[in-house]
């Protein structure tokens, strides 16, 4: 058995980079992007989303890591760890957590002073359990 494991490990480690990458790409699928629309007053800062990763008892599963994939052109996007109320849909088992403040991550947009019109941003979120989400924002600045 040890010899078989050594052979498998050797073949993986010694494989050309393209072979190793092809295998990884087949095993992990990127999440389907979710489109989100938000209205933000010009020159103001707003929390566009609050996201939490919770256990059924509403305790946090751990921190959420966020990355800006595409920055907005007419404002700034930032993330802030903090507490707020989650917003799970009614048929989600975690919807009982909606009335309790929970730790999570706020996605914040600050609109450029004087700008009015459309803006866009893309965010990639990685959750404590190894899952991920991709959010594409259409932001209307008024």
Image: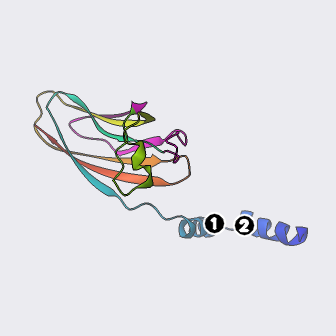
At label 2, counting other C-alpha atoms closer than 10 Å, the crowd grade (few under 14, some 14-19, many 20 or more) is: some
The magenta segment: 54-83
Residue 40 visible? The answer is yes
Q: Quick check: can you spot residue 80? A: no
Q: Secondary structure at mark 2?
A: helix
Q: Is residue 114 magenta?
A: no
> How far apart in space, not on screen, are marks 1 and 2 (Cα)?
7 Å
Quadrant of the drawing holding the N terminus: bottom right
The spot of residue 59 in percent (x, y) is 53, 39
Residue tagged 1: 20
Q: Look at mark 2 in the image and give the residue it sits on.
A: 12
Image-based side of 124 in relation to 8, left or right = left
Circle 1 — which element?
Answer: helix
**In the rendering, at what x and y percent does residue 40 appear?**
17, 36
Q: Image quadrant of residue 34?
A: bottom left
Residue drawn at x 34%, y 45% as measured from the top left: 87
**Quadrant housing the C terminus:** top left
Q: Is residue 72 magenta?
A: yes
Considering depth in this image, is 61 or 89 the residue closer to the camera? 89
Above or below for 121 versus 82: below
Q: Residue at x 35, y 58 (%)?
A: 33
CB under 8 Å between discs 1 and 2: yes
Question: In the orientation shown, which residue stands out farthest toward the right?
Answer: 2
- Residue 111 in the image: x percent, y percent? 20, 32
Residue lying at 40% horizontally and 55% vertically, measured from the top left = 92
Q: Quadrant of residue 9?
A: bottom right
Q: Nearer the viewer, residue 14 or 87?
A: 87
Q: Return the residue nearer the eye: 47 or 60.
A: 60
């Amino acid at each position: 058995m040890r010899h078989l494991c050594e052979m498998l490990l050797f073949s993986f480690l010694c494989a050309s980079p393209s072979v190793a990458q092809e295998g990884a790409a087949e095993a992990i699928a990127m999440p389907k992007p979710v489109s989100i629309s938000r209205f933000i007053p010009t020159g103001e800062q707003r929390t566009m989303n609050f996201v939490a990763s919770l256990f059924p008892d509403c305790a946090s599963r751990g921190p959420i890591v966020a990355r800006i994939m595409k920055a907005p052109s007419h404002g700034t996007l930032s993330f802030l760890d903090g507490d707020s109320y989650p917003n799970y849909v009614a048929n989600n088992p975690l919807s009982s957590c909606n009335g309790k403040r929970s730790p999570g991550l706020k996605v914040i947009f600050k609109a450029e002073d004087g700008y009015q019109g459309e803006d866009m941003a893309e965010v990639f979120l990685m959750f404590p359990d190894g899952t991920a989400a991709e959010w594409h924002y259409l932001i209307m600045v008024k």
